Image (spheres, rainbow, N blue to C red):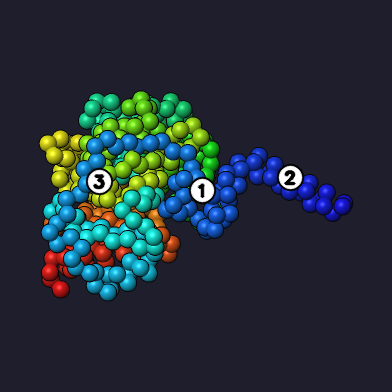
Amino acid sequence: MTILIYLITFVILALAVFYILGYGYLFNGISKTYLRGKMSANIDDGKFFSANLIATKAPVPWEKAPEYNKKELPKHIADDLILSDTASFIVIKDGKMLHEQYWKGYHALSTTNSFSMAKAVTVMLLGKALEEGKIASIDDKFSDYFEEFKSKEFAEHLTLKDLARMESGLDWDEDYKNPFLPNAKAYYGRSLMKATFSRKFKSRPGERFEYQSGSTQLLGFAVRKAVGKPLASYLSEKFWIPLGMEQNATWSTDESGMEKTYCCIHSNARDFAKLGQLFLDNGKAGDQQLLNPDFMDLMKTPTQHSEEIYGMGFWINNDNQVKHYYFLGLQGQYIIMVPEHKMVIVRTGSYNNLPKTDRGRPDQVKFLVNETVKFFSGNQ
């Protein structure tokens, strides 16, 4: 009995120490991963988090090409998708659905986690807020929105463009596996403001590229303050409804209702594809201009500090024979735009060991672009 009392006391003290040190979010993480048979965040975890609704009103289904699903994927493409635990694979050509396939019980209405594809969506909302005059300039200082950053070393120079380009100088280790680092605290914690506003800055903004979820989360705070409403509502009004998305989506939030703007839009592959098509159509949906083409050009223009691989929210590959740019999320969530071939490729799934040997860009993206274009262009 004495041993049991000591054990209980030890556990209580250990829990207290974890909470005092700011690691209480770990228990939330454990309950949403290990206790549910998962080893980390996963594409189906949206139902375990609070979320804001991204509503649609008048769904417009994809028009199917005459050749829709008439060609079976060649073995080398199918094997790559199956071995990487793919959930969905969609090919849009000339604005029509050409190929659509699902695995592992997923289907056309399955909603999965965008992970960091949401970063590009957050930048789109920045662009819309600029267009509407809710934000005066992309060179606005972040401290104009949150005065406490004026007293932080380096942060007084931080602009919205720095955040969009991943050139903030923020002290943020982009590690997805270590539960004691910032990404886990932002993902499982109660307050995104505490997770991000508590971080220091290690260098002057605008001088160095470093991909960081914290930068996009800060950008999200500024955009939300500027538009004066939940970003899920703004996304619904400005893009989801005008694009005729087939389903409502959700955007995971912290306990205050703030969207995780670096992550976590839960939608289906068909609707993700419509975001890609918007860029191939220069920001137009029917007769509506939803996003300024000049701002879109900024998003897909590679920056010097990133060594020409990142723009604003988008990863870019202009050194491949088939040039492309794309939304990218953890575990292989892709919305890929291939302008030369008027093609959008969407892949969702759970690729936990995703190789990134192409200067930080996933090997699978280039493979899917090259092989999909070759197959569906009849150049095999």
Cα distance in 3D space between marks 3 and 1: 27 Å
Residue that carries the numbered disc 2 in the rendered image: 12
**Is mark 2 in CB contact (under 8 Å) with mark 1?**
no
Quadrant of the image containing the C terminus: bottom left
Secondary structure of residue under mark 3? helix
- Tell me the residue at 48%/34% (across/down): 193
Labelled disc at residue 275: 3
> Which quadrant holds residue 360?
bottom left
- Tell me the residue at 23%/62% (across/down): 369
Eyeballing the image, is 236 above or below 342? above
Q: Position of residue 315 (x, y in %)?
A: 28, 53
> Which quadrant holds residue 102?
bottom left
- Name the one closer to the observer, 142 or 177: 177
Eyeballing the image, is 221 above or below 300? above
Among the two numbered marks 2 and 3 on one chain, the one whose residue lies closer to the N terminus? 2
Cα distance in 3D space between marks 2 and 3: 48 Å
> Which quadrant holds residue 125?
top left
Secondary structure of residue under mark 2? helix
Q: Can residue 157 be spotted in the picture? A: no
Residue that carries the numbered disc 1 in the rendered image: 184
Mark whose residue sits in front, 3 or 1: 3
Query: Of the residues shown, which amino acid type is indicated by label 3?
Result: Leu
